[in-house]
Amino acid sequence: MLRVDIITIFPGYFREVLDFGIIRRARAAGLVDIQAHDLRGWTSDKHHVVDDRPFGGGDGMVLKPEPIFAAVESLVGAKRRESIAGGKRVVLLSPQGKPFSQSLAAEFALTEQLVLICGRYEGVDERVADALVTDEISIGDYVLSGGEPAALTVIDATVRLLPGALGSDTSAVNESFSDGLLDCPQYTRPPEFEGMRPPDVLLKGNHAEIERWRREAATEKTRRNRPDLLKP
Ligand code: ADE
């Protein structure tokens, strides 16, 4: 069973989103246990302050290191990256991170514990990235107001790869990115919709022809929308 611990100042954000579809089924089947923890629970001052002004000046507030280090110590049993057990990953979500990818999701699906630290405000004290986490990850080249939607994205991409998470009629093998191409286009009934028809080859049932069409259509779609994936 994969254990996922989310460290956030908005634990309520995750209350309902984890209750749908594949994630809900995986949780119900005991494949994953997901807990969202309030970072403020690891503060020791009266007002539960988690942020402070940046050294050197500038706009905005920075998440303080002490509550985050305390949270990871209590959830993982390690005070520094070097003492984190193999099979555990401690991830900081931030726009400065390495790009998230299908292959990273596949690595995470093999772990026993995934801790996701959601950044907020204008940043997180850099000592967290320097000394505490195993991975600093971005989900894309845009700035979110916090790491929560990014954590959700990492959870979704990871949980659906857990053995048994997808129904037997679905497979994670034949899909976008697992072979470096986007998925081929799919069609379903009706065969004619407002004058638009699927390619005839899909309606005829010649499986070799269908396979050939799908490979070519996937390549064409990739060339059009993601030419970067075709570059050597
Ligand atoms: N926090 C803010 N923006 C982010 C991004 N693009 N990826 C991960 N975490 C973030």
Image: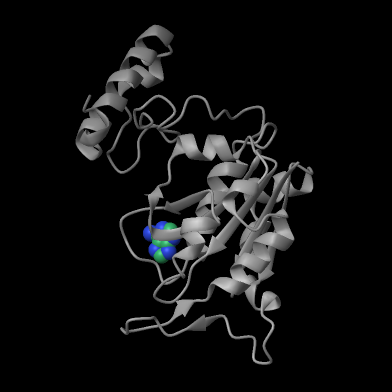
Which residue is more in the foreground, 64 or 207? 64
**Left or right: 174 in relation to 159:** left
Q: Position of residue 92 (x, y in %)?
A: 50, 58
Quadrant assignment, res 190: top left
**Quarter holding ligand 1:** bottom left
For residue 185, side relative to residue 22 (left or right): left
Picture quarter containing residue 49? bottom right
Q: What quarter of the picture does the N terminus occupy?
A: top right
Image color mode: one colour
Residue shown at the point (57%, 43%) measured from the top left: 158
Q: Is residue 207 above or below residue 119?
A: above
Q: Is residue 206 visible?
A: no
- Position of residue 232 measured from the top left corner of the image (x, y, whole percent): 22, 24
Residue located at (56% from left, 48% from top): 156
Q: Residue at x 35, y 35 (%)?
A: 192
Answer left or right for 48 relative to 186: right
User: Residue 98: where, in percent of width, then height?
Assistant: 39, 48
Q: Residue furthest bottom?
A: 46
